[in-house]
Image (spheres, coloured by chain):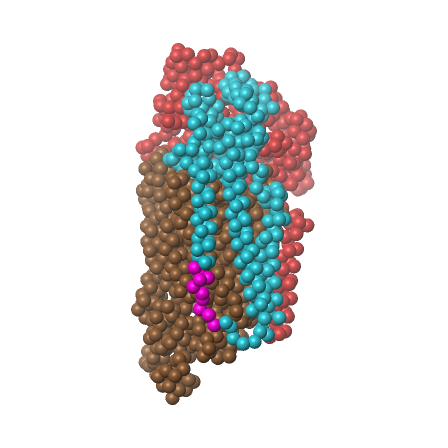
C-alpha cells in the first residue's frame, strides 16, 4: 500500500490552501486594513492573481494526486503507457498559460503607473521631506513658505503628520545607506538611495495612526526604524498641530509638556 | 538491521519529544537572559589595591543595597522621593534588557556588544550624568531630560527615537535610567571613600566588612538622592525671552563666537564646522592617551579619558553647526542651556558664568543664522 | 554480456596497472570526475550542516527574541546575558543565505551531479579537462575558509544580506560586519565564482566534444541537458559578478568609488570619495544572481526528470519541449534581473518591461510541470525514496512557482517586496525544489557512487519528516508576508502590526529545529550505509540511462574499460514494445534484428 504516500502530498496541498482560510482576517497574518486609494487597486490585483494561481494550483494538485493514487497502485498489471508526448497538448498548455500570464502582466500596468510614474504624481506642493538614516526617519515639513530649510520648518523624528484625503507628496532621501519607506496600511513602499531623490505619493482615506517600517536592510538597527503616520481628520486639524509644533520648536522657556506627541 | 531500525525510531521519537519540550512555553524561565551587574571597570582600574576579594565584597554590598539585576530597587524611599514607582523601575529594567542592553551594556556602562562599532559611543550611566540635560553641569539630570532623549533620540547617532512607544514604557525606561545613573554614581563614590578610609585593608571579618561598606553606601547614596531631589529645582531657565534675530543681534553673536575670550571658534571653527584648531588637526600630533602620532580629533570625552581608551567613538567632536541639527535639541532653550552649562561629560564648557543671558541669546541667534549653510 | 564485461574489465585492469596512483592522487588531489563529484558531496554535507545551524539561530531569534540562545548564548554573548546582540541577527541571515546558496545548492547540484553524472551519462572517459576539474573543487575550500573565518574577525561576518548592497556593504563604517567580514565574504564569493566558472567550461566542452558513439544531443538524459544549459548560464553570467565583486573590494579597500555617492557620511565618519552609484551594484549583482536562481534549480529539474521516468517506468512526456523549456528559462533568465529592483528607485518604466519578461519566464516552468504530470499519467509508479523526493520537488515547485507570480506583478510587489512572502517563495524554490532535488539525486545515485544502497526505510523516515516539517516551517511565511511581516528584522514584534504573529513564529521555529534533527537521519543513513548498506549490484533501479551500464559496478579511472559504449536510443524508452517485463530497455541494448544485435549475441 505504498500509494498511501499520496495522502502525504495531499495533506501538504490541503494545508497550503487551508492556512489561508485559517488566517483570514487575523491580525498580523492578513493584510492590515487598507486605508489608501492605491491600496484598493493593489489589493484587487493581489486577489486577481490569487484566484488565478489558486485555481491553477488546485487543478494541478488534483491531477497530480489523482495520477499518484491511480498509477501508484502496485497491483496494476502490465507496462506503462508507451508515449513520448502529444503535440497538441504541448501547444495548448503553452499557449493558454502564455495568454493568462500576458493578461496578468498587462492588467498590472495601470496601477503601477498610478503608483510610481512621475507623470502621475499629483500636482500638489511637497508635503514633507523624509530623510532616512541609521536608524531614524527625520521628517521635515517645508511649512507655509513651501521651502525646506527655512525658519518655519518643523522637523520631527519618526512622526509623519498629514490629513485625510490629502495628496501626500513626499521627497525621500537617505543620508547613509539604503532604506525603504514602507507603510503597510497604505501598501506603499519605496527604497531610498543615498545620492538620489525619490518621490512618493499616496492618499489616505481614513484618519488614524499607521505604522511606517523600514523594508531594506540598513544595519543592526533595521528593526528599530518604527515611524508613525498620523492622519488628521481635516486640514484645519493638521494646521493646528503644525502651529503647535512650530511653537514648541521655538520654545525659549521651559516647555510644560514633556510629550513630543502632544498631550 | 530490523532491530537497529526500531532503536533508531526510538531515538528519533525521543529527539522530537525533547525538542518540543525544550521549546514549550513552560520553559520560559530557562530562556531568561543571564544578566548581572558587573563592577565598574574604572573602579577596577583606579583602585586595583582593593584586590579581587575587595571587589567581590563591594559587588556583594551593591547587590544587597540596590538589588540583583532581576529586581532593581532604589533604597531609602528614593524612588518615592523622585516620583518613581518601584514597579516602573522593574518594568523599565525588563524593557532595557530587550531594547537597550546590547548597546548600553548589562550594567549601563555603555559597553554592550554593539558599542565598539558606534561613533559616538553609547552613553555610560556609570558617571551619574548624561550629556544633554537641562540642569547645571554639576547636578544630575531631571526626569524630563531622560524622557526627551528617549523620545527624540540623539540626532544623527545610533540612539534611536522611541517616540512611538507608550507613555508607560517611556516613563519606565526613564525611571530605570535614573536607577542606573544613581547606582553608578553611588558605586564610584563608595569606591572613593573605601579607598580613602582604607576600609578594605583593615582586619575585619567578612560580615563586619560588609557592614562597613553598606554603611558608607547608605551615606553616599543619601547624598546622591539629595542631589537628584535638588536638581529638580535647578533647571536652567532663560531670565529673558529670546530677542528678535535682528542683524545687530546676529552680528554681536558672531563677534562673541569669534572672540578670543569665549573661544567658540577655537573648537567649532570659524566656519562653524566643528573642526577648530583646538580640537582638530590634519597635521600629525601625539595622541593624548597613547602618545602615538595621528591626525584627526585631538581630544577625548570623559569616558574615553577615564578608560584610557584611544578608540573610535570616544573622541570629543564639537558640533558641526551648519548641518541643521543639534544633538542636544533644536529649540532655542536647548541651545541656551547648552551654552550656559556646556555638554556634560565632554569638553564643551559652561559659559553661564561668563556671559550674560543677552549675550547667550545673541550667540543663539548667530548660530541659528548659519545652521542651514551646510545642508544644501 | 557478463563474459564481455569481464574481458573488458581485465583489459582495463592491465592497462591501469602500469601507473598505480598514490592514495593522495587517487582520493584527495584526484582528477577522476567521479572522485571529484564525491568530494563535492562530502563538502556539501558539511556546509549544509553549517548553513542549517545559522538558520536555526535566525529562527530562534524570531521565536524568542532577546532570550538566552541555547548552547551558543553562554559561549558567545556572555556580555549580553547570553542573548543575541542586535548586530548578530543580520549576520546570521546573511551568512545562512550565502552558505546555502553558494556553498550548498550551487556546488551541490552542479558540482556533485555535474561531475559525477555527465561523463557517465554521455559515455565519456572523464571530463575534457580533468586537472581543471580538480582545481575547480579545490577552489571551494578557500571560499569555505573565508566564510568561516569571517565570523572570527573584528566585527564578525558580513551583515548586509547575501545581496551585499552598498553603501551598507561597500563601506567599512556602516555596520560591525562591514569591517573585514564583508571583505572576506567578497573574496569567498570570488573563489566560488572561479570554481563554478572552471566547472562550467569543463561541462560545456565535455558535453560538446566527448559524447560517445550514438549519443546525439537529443539522446542525452535531462540531467546532462540541464547541467549543460546551466553551465552556459554560468559561463555568461559569472564574469559580471566577478567584476562587480572586484569593484566592491576596490571600493572598500582601495577607496575607489564605483558604488559610493557624493559626500557620504556613515556612522559619523566620512565614507570616502564619492561620484558612484549604489544602484549600479544592484544591476551587476542581479545580472548574475538572477540567472543564479536558475543555476540553482535547473540541474534539480534534470535530476527529477531522470528519477521520475525511472520510477514511473515510462518515457519522459515531451522530451523535446522539456529541453526547449530549459533553454527558454536560461534565455529569459538573462532579461529578468530587474524584477529584484522594482522598488529600488530604478526607472519605473523599466519595471514594466521586466514584469512582462518575468511573467513569461513562468511559462517554461509551467510547461515542465505539465510534462511531469504527463509522465506520471499512465505510469507504473515505484515508491522508492528517490521517487518520493522527486515528487516532493514537483509539488513544492508548483507552490514556489505560483507564488513567484505575485512578486512579478509590480503593483503587488510594492507591498510584498522584502516581506516574508519573498522568504517563503525562495524557500519553496530552493528548499522544496533544489534541496529535495538534491536529496532525490543523492538517494538515486548513491548505489552508483558507493556500490551500496542507503536504507530505504530510513530514507523514507527522513523524507516524511523533512516534507512535513518543511511545509510547517515555510508555508506560514506566505501568510506572514501577506501581513507585511518584513525580512531581516531581529524583532518584528516591536511593531504593533506584527505583534500578534509570535505564536506562529514559535511553531515555525520548533518545526525548524525538528527539521534539523531529521537531517541527522540523512547523515547517519549516508555514513552508515557506506559500510553496512545492502550491496547494490550493477543497476538496482533497473534504469535505462548510460551511467548504470558501466562494465564495473564502480568503474575505475576511464569508466568504460577498453571501448566506450555505443548508444542506440534515448534514455527514457521505458515500456517500449521491445522492453522487458518491467519496461527496462537500456540505451546500450542494440535494437532487435540489427547487425549490432547479431554481433552482440555472439
State the image coordinates of residue A35 (x, y, percent, origin top left). Answer: 55, 34
Q: Residue at x 35, y 40 (%)?
A: C277
As for residue B93 lying within the magenta part, the answer is no
In the image, is residue B218 above or below residue A97? above
Tell me the quadrant of the picture where the N terminus of chain B can be found: bottom right
State the image coordinates of residue C572 (x, y, percent, origin top left). Answer: 44, 71
In the image, is residue A186 above or below residue C285? above
Find the residue positioned furthest to the front. A88
* Residue span colored magenta: A82-91
In the image, is residue B247 above or below residue A92? above
Q: Residue at x 45, y 79 (%)?
A: C578
Which chain identifier belongs to the brown chain? C
- Taking the image as drawn, is residue A52 in sight? yes
Q: Residue at x 50, y 52 (%)?
A: C402
Rendered colour, chain B: red
Judge left or right: residue C272 versus residue C520: left
Along the line of sight, which residue is nearer the eye, C453 or C59?
Answer: C453
State the count of labels.
0
Which chain identifier belongs to the cyan chain? A
In the image, is residue C22 above or below residue B274? below
Q: Residue at x 37, y 35 (%)?
A: A195
Classify residue C3 by image quadrant: bottom left
Tell me the quadrant of the picture where the C terminus of chain B can be found: top left
Amino acid at each position: 500500500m505504498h500509494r498511501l504516500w499520496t495522502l502525504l502530498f495531499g495533506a501538504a496541498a490541503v494545508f497550503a490552501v487551508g492556512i489561508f482560510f485559517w488566517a483570514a482576517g487575523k491580525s498580523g497574518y492578513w493584510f492590515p486594513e487598507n486605508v489608501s486609494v492605491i491600496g484598493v487597486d493593489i489589493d484587487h490585483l493581489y486577489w486577481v492573481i490569487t484566484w488565478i494561481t489558486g485555481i491553477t494550483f488546485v487543478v494541478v494538485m488534483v491531477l497530480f494526486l489523482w495520477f499518484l493514487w491511480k498509477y501508484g497502485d502496485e497491483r496494476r498489471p502490465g507496462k506503462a503507457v508507451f508515449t513520448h508526448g502529444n503535440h497538441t497538448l504541448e501547444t495548448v498548455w503553452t499557449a493558454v498559460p502564455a495568454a493568462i500570464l500576458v493578461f496578468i502582466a498587462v492588467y498590472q500596468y495601470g496601477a503601477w503607473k498610478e503608483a510610481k510614474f512621475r507623470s502621475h504624481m499629483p500636482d500638489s506642493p511637497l508635503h514633507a521631506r523624509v530623510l532616512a538614516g541609521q536608524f531614524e526617519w527625520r521628517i521635515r515639513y517645508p511649512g507655509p513658505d513651501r521651502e525646506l530649510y527655512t525658519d518655519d520648518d518643523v522637523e520631527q523624528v519618526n512622526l509623519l503628520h498629514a490629513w485625510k484625503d490629502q495628496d501626500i507628496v513626499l521627497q525621500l532621501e537617505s543620508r547613509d545607506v539604503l532604506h525603504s519607506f514602507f507603510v503597510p496600511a497604505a501598501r506603499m513602499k519605496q527604497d531610498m538611495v543615498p545620492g538620489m531623490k525619490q518621490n512618493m505619493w499616496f492618499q489616505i482615506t481614513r484618519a488614524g495612526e499607521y505604522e511606517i517600517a523600514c523594508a531594506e536592510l540598513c544595519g543592526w538597527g533595521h528593526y528599530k526604524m518604527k515611524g508613525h503616520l498620523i492622519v488628521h481628520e481635516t486640514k484645519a486639524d493638521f494646521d493646528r498641530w503644525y502651529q503647535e509644533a512650530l511653537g514648541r520648536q521655538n520654545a525659549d522657556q521651559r516647555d510644560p509638556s514633556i510629550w513630543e506627541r502632544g498631550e | 538491521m530490523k532491530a537497529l531500525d526500531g532503536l533508531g525510531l526510538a531515538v528519533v521519537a525521543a529527539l522530537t519529544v525533547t525538542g518540543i519540550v525544550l521549546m514549550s512555553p513552560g520553559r520560559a524561565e530557562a530562556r531568561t537572559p543571564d544578566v548581572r551587574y558587573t563592577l565598574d571597570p574604572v573602579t577596577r582600574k583606579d583602585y586595583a589595591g582593593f584586590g579581587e576579594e575587595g571587589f567581590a565584597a563591594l559587588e556583594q554590598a551593591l547587590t544587597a543595597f540596590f538589588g540583583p539585576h532581576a529586581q532593581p530597587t532604589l533604597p531609602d524611599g528614593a524612588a518615592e522621593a523622585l516620583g518613581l514607582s518601584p514597579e516602573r523601575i522593574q518594568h523599565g529594567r525588563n524593557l532595557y534588557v530587550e531594547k537597550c542592553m546590547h548597546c548600553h551594556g548589562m550594567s549601563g556602562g555603555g559597553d554592550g556588544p554593539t558599542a565598539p562599532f558606534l561613533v559616538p559611543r553609547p552613553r555610560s550611566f556609570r558617571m551619574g550624568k548624561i550629556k544633554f540635560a537641562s540642569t547645571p553641569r554639576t547636578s544630575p539630570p531631571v526626569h524630563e531630560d531622560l524622557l526627551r532623549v528617549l523620545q527624540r533620540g540623539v540626532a544623527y547617532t545610533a540612539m534611536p527615537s522611541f517616540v512611538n512607544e507608550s507613555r508607560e514604557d517611556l516613563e519606565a525606561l526613564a525611571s530605570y535610567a535614573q536607577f542606573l545613573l544613581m547606582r553608578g554614581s553611588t558605586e564610584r563614590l563608595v569606591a572613593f571613600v573605601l579607598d580613602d578610609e582604607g576600609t578594605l585593608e583593615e582586619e575585619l571579618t567578612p560580615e563586619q566588612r560588609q557592614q562597613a561598606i553598606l554603611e558608607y553606601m547608605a551615606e553616599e547614596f543619601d547624598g546622591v538622592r539629595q542631589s537628584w531631589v535638588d536638581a529638580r529645582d535647578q533647571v536652567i531657565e532663560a531670565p529673558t525671552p529670546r530677542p528678535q534675530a535682528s542683524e545687530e543681534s546676529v552680528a554681536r553673536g558672531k563677534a562673541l563666537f569669534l572672540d578670543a575670550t569665549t573661544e567658540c571658534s577655537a573648537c567649532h571653527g570659524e566656519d562653524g564646522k566643528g573642526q577648530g584648531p583646538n580640537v582638530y588637526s590634519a597635521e600629525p600630533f601625539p595622541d593624548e592617551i597613547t602618545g602615538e602620532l595621528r591626525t584627526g580629533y585631538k581630544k577625548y570625552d570623559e569616558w574615553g579619558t577615564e578608560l584610557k581608551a584611544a578608540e573610535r567613538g570616544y573622541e570629543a567632536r564639537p558640533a558641526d553647526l551648519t548641518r541643521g541639527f543639534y544633538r542636544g535639541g533644536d529649540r532655542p532653550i536647548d541651545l541656551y542651556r547648552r551654552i550656559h552649562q556646556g555638554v556634560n561629560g565632554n569638553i564643551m564648557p559652561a559659559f553661564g558664568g561668563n556671559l550674560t543671558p543677552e549675550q547667550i541669546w545673541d550667540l543663539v541667534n548667530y548660530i541659528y543664522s548659519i545652521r542651514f549653510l551646510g545642508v544644501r | 554480456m557478463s563474459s564481455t564485461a569481464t574481458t573488458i574489465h581485465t583489459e582495463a585492469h592491465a592497462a591501469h596497472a602500469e601507473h598505480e596512483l598514490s592514495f593522495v592522487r587517487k582520493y584527495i588531489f584526484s582528477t577522476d570526475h567521479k572522485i571529484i563529484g564525491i568530494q563535492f558531496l562530502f563538502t556539501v554535507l558539511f556546509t549544509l550542516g553549517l548553513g542549517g545551524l545559522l538558520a536555526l539561530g535566525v529562527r530562534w531569534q524570531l521565536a524568542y527574541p532577546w532570550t538566552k540562545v541555547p548552547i551558543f548564548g553562554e559561549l558567545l554573548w556572555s556580555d549580553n546575558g547570553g542573548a543575541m546582540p542586535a548586530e548578530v541577527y543580520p549576520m546570521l541571515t546573511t551568512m545562512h543565505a550565502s552558505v546555502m546558496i553558494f556553498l550548498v545548492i550551487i556546488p551541490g547540484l552542479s558540482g556533485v551531479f555535474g561531475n559525477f553524472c555527465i561523463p557517465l551519462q554521455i559515455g565519456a572517459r572523464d571530463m575534457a579537462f580533468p586537472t581543471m576539474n580538480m582545481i575547480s573543487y579545490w577552489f571551494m575550500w578557500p571560499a569555505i575558509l573565508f566564510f568561516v573565518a569571517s565570523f572570527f574577525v573584528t566585527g564578525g561576518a558580513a551583515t548586509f544580506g547575501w545581496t551585499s548592497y552598498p553603501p551598507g556593504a561597500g563601506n567599512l563604517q556602516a555596520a560591525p560586519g562591514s569591517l573585514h567580514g564583508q571583505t572576506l565574504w567578497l573574496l569567498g564569493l570570488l573563489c566560488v565564482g572561479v570554481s563554478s566558472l572552471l566547472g562550467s567550461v569543463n561541462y560545456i566542452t565535455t558535453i560538446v566534444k566527448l559524447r560517445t558513439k550514438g549519443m546525439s544531443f537529443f539522446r542525452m538524459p535531462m540531467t546532462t541537458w540541464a547541467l549543460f544549459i546551466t553551465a552556459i548560464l554560468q559561463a555568461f553570467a559569472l564574469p559580471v559578478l566577478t567584476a562587480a565583486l572586484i569593484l566592491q573590494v576596490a571600493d572598500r579597500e582601495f577607496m575607489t568609488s564605483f558604488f559610493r555617492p557624493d559626500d557620504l557620511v556613515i556612522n559619523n565618519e566620512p565614507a570616502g570619495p564619492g561620484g558612484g552609484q549604489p544602484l549600479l551594484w544592484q544591476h551587476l549583482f542581479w545580472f548574475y544572481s538572477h540567472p543564479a536562481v536558475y543555476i540553482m534549480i535547473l540541474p534539480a529539474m534534470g535530476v527529477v526528470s531522470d528519477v521520475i521516468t525511472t520510477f514511473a517506468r515510462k518515457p519522459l512526456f515531451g522530451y523535446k519541449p522539456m529541453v526547449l523549456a530549459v533553454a527558454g528559462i536560461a534565455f529569459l533568465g538573462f532579461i529578468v534581473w530587474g524584477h529584484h529592483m522594482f522598488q529600488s528607485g530604478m526607472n519605473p518604466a523599466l519595471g514594466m518591461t521586466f514584469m512582462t519578461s518575468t511573467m513569461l519566464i513562468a511559462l517554461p516552468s509551467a510547461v515542465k510541470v505539465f510534462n511531469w504530470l504527463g509522465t506520471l499519467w499512465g505510469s507504473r509508479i515505484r515508491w522508492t525514496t528517490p521517487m518520493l523526493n522527486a515528487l516532493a520537488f514537483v509539488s513544492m515547485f508548483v507552490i514556489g512557482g505560483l507564488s513567484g507570480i505575485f512578486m512579478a506583478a509590480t503593483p503587488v510587489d510594492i507591498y510584498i517586496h522584502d516581506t516574508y512572502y519573498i522568504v517563503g517563495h525562495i524557500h519553496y524554490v530552493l528548499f522544496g525544489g533544489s534541496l529535495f532535488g538534491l536529496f532525490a539525486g543523492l538517494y538515486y545515485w548513491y548505489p552508483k557512487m558507493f556500490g551500496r544502497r542507503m536504507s530505504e526505510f530510513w530514507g523514507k523516515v527522513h523524507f516524511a519528516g523533512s516534507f512535513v516539517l518543511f511545509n510547517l516551517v515555510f508555508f506560514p511565511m506566505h501568510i506572514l508576508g501577506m501581513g507585511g511581516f518584513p525580512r531581516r528584522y531581529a524583532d518584528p514584534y516591536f511593531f504593533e502590526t506584527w505583534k500578534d504573529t509570535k505564536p506562529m513564529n514559535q511553531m515555525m521555529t520548533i518545526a525548524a529545529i525538528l527539521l534539523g534533527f531529521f537531517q541527522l537521519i540523512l547523515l547517519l543513513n549516508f555514513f552508515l550505509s557506506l559500510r553496512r548498506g545492502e550491496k547494490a549490484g550493477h543497476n538496482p533501479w533497473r534504469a535505462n540511462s548510460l551511467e548504470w551500464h558501466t562494465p564495473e559496478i564502480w568503474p575505475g579511472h576511464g569508466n568504460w574499460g577498453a571501448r566506450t559504449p555505443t548508444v542506440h536510443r534515448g534514455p527514457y524508452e521505458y515500456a517500449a514494445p521491445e522492453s522487458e517485463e518491467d519496461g527496462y530497455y537500456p540505451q546500450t541494448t542494440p535494437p532487435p534484428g540489427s547487425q549490432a544485435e547479431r554481433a552482440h549475441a555472439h
